[in-house]
Image (cartoon, rainbow, N blue to C red):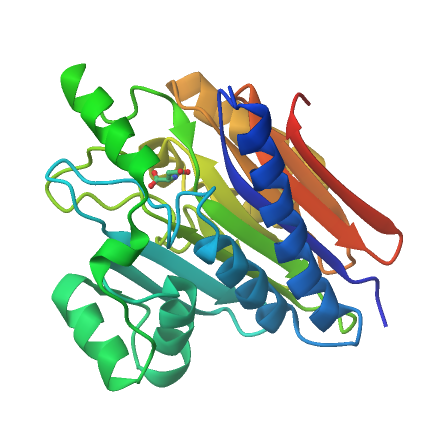
Amino acid sequence: MTNWQLMIHGGCGSMRLTAEEERAGRAGLNSALDAGEAILARGGDALDAVEAAARVLEDHPSFNAGRGSVLTHDGHIELDAAIMDGRTRSAGAVAGLRTVRAPISAARAVMERSPHVLLSFDGAEEFVREQGLETVDPSWFEIPERRAMLDRVLAEGGAFDADVKYGTIGAVAADVNGHVAAATSTGGLTAKRWNRIGDSPLIGAGTYADDRAAAISATGSGEYFIRTVAAHELCARMRMKGEDLQTALDGVLAEIGALGGKGGMIAVSPAGEAAWGFTTAGMYRGKVSASGREVAVHGA
Ligand code: ASP
């Protein structure tokens, strides 16, 4: 038996939040920790814990995933998600979903019930409908704040990440059997076009889990996390350079910074160690283990 650990994030960025926004975000993080903790504390699987935690964050409007996702350039929603099991390195991912309520569970269905790793757009919709996953009208995902954000970004010329707020959600966990898992879900970037897909659903970039090293979920300027294959790079540093979890995480963020990218990552090792880091002003984040719970928004 090893120590279980759950770590989550709700995206990073400038974190200029009203008191009410911060309160709501913290409440969402705590509910997600509750959901994952209930599974891990009774000896359940890391994979089930990250899915459960991610579903709570997807449903919570404070975050850019599921309900509360940002809008594309032409005003709709395209949802991306990925999940990975460190025990077998099985993985599943979806990109460009519009009606599936829990994209993370759609990713899990791809992993467990299809021969593929990544499905996208209409084909992904068709697959998850065949699997009987819950769908909702696309309007269910939209909240007025994201519409206002899109209007603002378009008025400023449509720069993709003009407000530098990345609200993607993620969860990583280690269970008592020493297995790790990772989950990431996002609406992507405000005003994205051309069916742009970020790092979140790309295995190795925004999401990765390997029992030989760690489980990772990222948030930030996705293109840089793709170019550095960030989550896998963190594992490679541990496996091949012998770096510890925090050193590897800091090293990857520094590499991304050197290229001009910003963001954050959360990571756990199979032994239950936890590390987080970000190069923005703040990151919605939380962790829980048998030794306690921490939720934070600002600062280092
Ligand atoms: N990394 C995500 C993307 O590029 C955005 C985010 O973290 O909010 O799609």
Does residue 134 show up? yes
34, 260: nearer the viewer: 34
Vertical relation: 134 (above or below) 159:
below
In the image, taking residue 153 as reference, residue 117 lies left or right, namely right
Check the picture and name the quadrant holding the N terminus: bottom right
Apparent side of residue 175 relative to residue 142 in the rendered image (left or right):
right
- Give the residue drawn at x 38%, y 48%: 200
Residue 297 on image: x %, y %? 63, 30
Q: In which quarter of the image is ligand 1?
A: top left
Residue 262 falls left or right of residue 20: left
- In the rendered image, the residue lying farthest to the right is 291
Name the foreground residue: 39 vs 227: 39
Choose between 190 and 244: the one closer to the eye: 190
Please count the marks in the image.
Answer: 0
Residue 92: which quarter of the image? bottom left
Residue 280: image location, x then y, percent:
52, 21
Q: Nearer the viewer, residue 120 or 251?
A: 120
Q: In this view, does 280 lie above or below 6?
A: above
Residue at left offset 57%, top offset 40% = 24
Evaluate whether residue 189 shows in this view: no
Up-down relation of residue 45 to residue 231 (above or below)? below
Q: Does 95 sit above or below residue 191?
A: below
Residue name at image x 52 percent, y 23 percent: 17
> If the image is split into quadrants, where does the C terminus sit?
top right
Tell me which corner region of the image, top left, top right, bottom left or bottom right, holds residue 39.
bottom right
Please state if 64 lies on the left or on the right of 280 as rendered. Answer: left
Give the image location of residue 253, x and y in percent: 53, 28
Q: Where is residue 146 in the image (x, y as percent from the top left)?
A: 30, 36
